[in-house]
Amino acid sequence: MTRVLRTRAELRAALARAPRPIGLVPTMGWLHGGHRALMRRARDADATTVVTIFVNPRQFDQAADFGRYPRSEARDLAICAEEEVDLVWMPPVEEVYPADFDTRVSVGALAGPLEGAARPGHFEGVATVVAILFALVGAEHAYFGQKDAQQVMVIRRMALDLALPTEVIACPTVREPDGLALSSRNFHLSPAERAAAPVLRRALLAARGRWEAGERSGEALRAAMRAVLASEPLAEGEYVSCADAETLAELERVQGPALLSLAVRFGPTRLIDNEPLPGPAG
Ligand code: AMP
């Protein structure tokens, strides 16, 4: 039975009786197969699965983007029930941020480039809400998607630095058959944009193919991604990156593990994706 909780007090009371270990899956709702995969990982490894559904206003740098983020409680709860989630915390905003709330988690260099540069304040908002969720739930494990690769890195760093006892576990990106990464934002794509959206994956795979063929110039790999994006008129590339997998610094030469990533706009809808390049031994 899936139980739905709204307040901090209800959540705490339910958790006090919950078998351990606890697995936490933080989400913003409009759940899809990517979220389901995280729930299944938690269900397999943990005695209690907790899903949080909260569209966090602090991680949106644009009010319009927050306003149009898709929401449906009934749809999300049906999916949580199907996935046999034990507890769903769906708080109103004042349960997360009480009126006198006055603290921010300040994130460092890892949050600087890529999504951090494109969306000022985004990772501070993410880190702040995740710190609250980690503190409230006290889970042994928390599951995040590799689709938001920089987010996982920032949160893992935060958990280490602040000695938060929740282990951060990254799970593979779940994709549509045509390669498009599942995302709540795909909902906004027009049919023509949806047909064009696999260009993100094609660009990443083109660069990966060049890397597999021996190309080690970061700029050549970025250019390979740009060339594929340029072939799709509906896609407006925002950034392409070939960065060090640990520091996210842009690479001149790829000599160890790297992360290919990109952000692309289709009209008002912004999509991201990435592809890790293993190191020489990987
Ligand atoms: P969101 O609801 O978009 O904030 O995402 C909640 C969690 O689901 C985050 O850890 C995301 O990285 C993860 N996630 C989103 N899309 C996917 C996907 N296609 N595959 C795997 N995980 C995902």
Image (cartoon, helix red, strand yellow):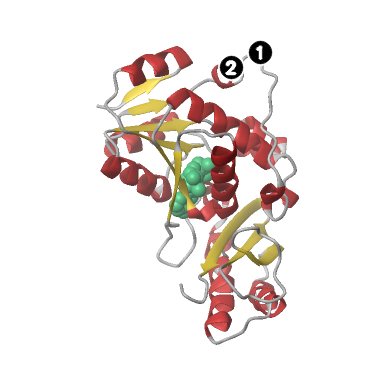
Q: Is residue 89 visible to the viewer in this orientation of the structure?
A: yes
Q: Nearer the viewer, residue 69 or 259?
A: 259
Q: Measuring from the top left, give residue 26's x and y in whole percent.
A: 47, 36
Q: Position of residue 152 (x, y in %)?
A: 54, 48
Q: Amino acid at mark 2?
A: Glu
Q: Outermost residue, left direction? A: 1
Residue at figure coordinates x 67%, y 50% from the top left:
110
Closer to the camera in the image, 278 or 10: 278
* Residue type highlighted by circle 1: Ala
Q: Which secondary structure, mark 1?
A: loop
Question: Which residue lies under the disc numbered 2?
Answer: 94
**SS of the residue under disc 2:** helix
Q: Is residue 34 left or right of residue 105?
A: left
Q: Which residue is mark 1?
A: 99
Using residue 105 as the reference point, say whether residue 145 is left or right of it: left
Q: CA distance from mark 1 to mark 2?
A: 7 Å
Front in this rendered view, residue 273 or 218: 218
The answer to whether mark 1 and mark 2 are in CB contact below 8 A is yes
Decide: few, some or many residues near mark 1? Use Cα within 10 Å; few <14, some 14-19, many ≥20.
Answer: few
Please tell me in which quadrant of the rendered image residue 125 appears: top right
Above or below residue 186? Residue 241 is below
At a point 64% along the width and 51% down the height, the residue shown is 269
